Image (tube, rainbow, N blue to C red):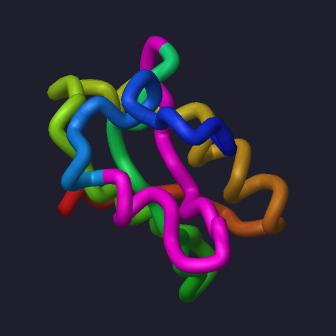
Amino acid sequence: MSHKDKSWTVPVEAERPEVWAKAADVRATVLHRGQVVALWTQKATRGRVTVQIQPLSGWVPGLERALAPDVDALAAHLDLAEGRISLG
């Protein structure tokens, strides 16, 4: 993701600054077929982790169901009882 031409990973130019912050800091991304389709953050509270997904233009409706096992694995890694996905 450090290539100068980022159009192949994030086709919509207006979304690139959301993915690559200042000082080449790359935000947490969701990849689908080699392209960034969403950004995500996590918040752990009361025995569960909530993964907040911010869809970008390439988001495929229903993709969150495919991400559920990864969120459950994250919860287990953090020794939390539950993982939850929030779209927004």
Above or below: residue 55 compared with residue 47: above
30 falls in the magenta region: yes
Q: Residue at x 51, y 18 (%)?
A: 34
Q: Nearer the viewer, residue 4 or 75?
A: 4
Is 63 a magenta residue?
no
Q: Position of residue 14 (x, y in %)?
A: 20, 54
Measured as percent of width and height from the top left, residue 31 is found at 49, 30
Q: Quadrant of residue 61?
A: top left
Q: Nearer the viewer, residue 31 or 15?
A: 15
Residue at image location 26% in from the left, 53% down from the top: 15
Q: Residue furthest bottom?
A: 46
Residue at image point 64% right, 69% down = 25
Q: Position of residue 83 (x, y in %)?
A: 54, 57
**Which residues make up the magenta segment?**
16-33
Q: Give the quadrant of the C terminus.
A: bottom left
Q: Is residue 56 left or right of residue 72?
A: left
82 relative to 72, above or below: below
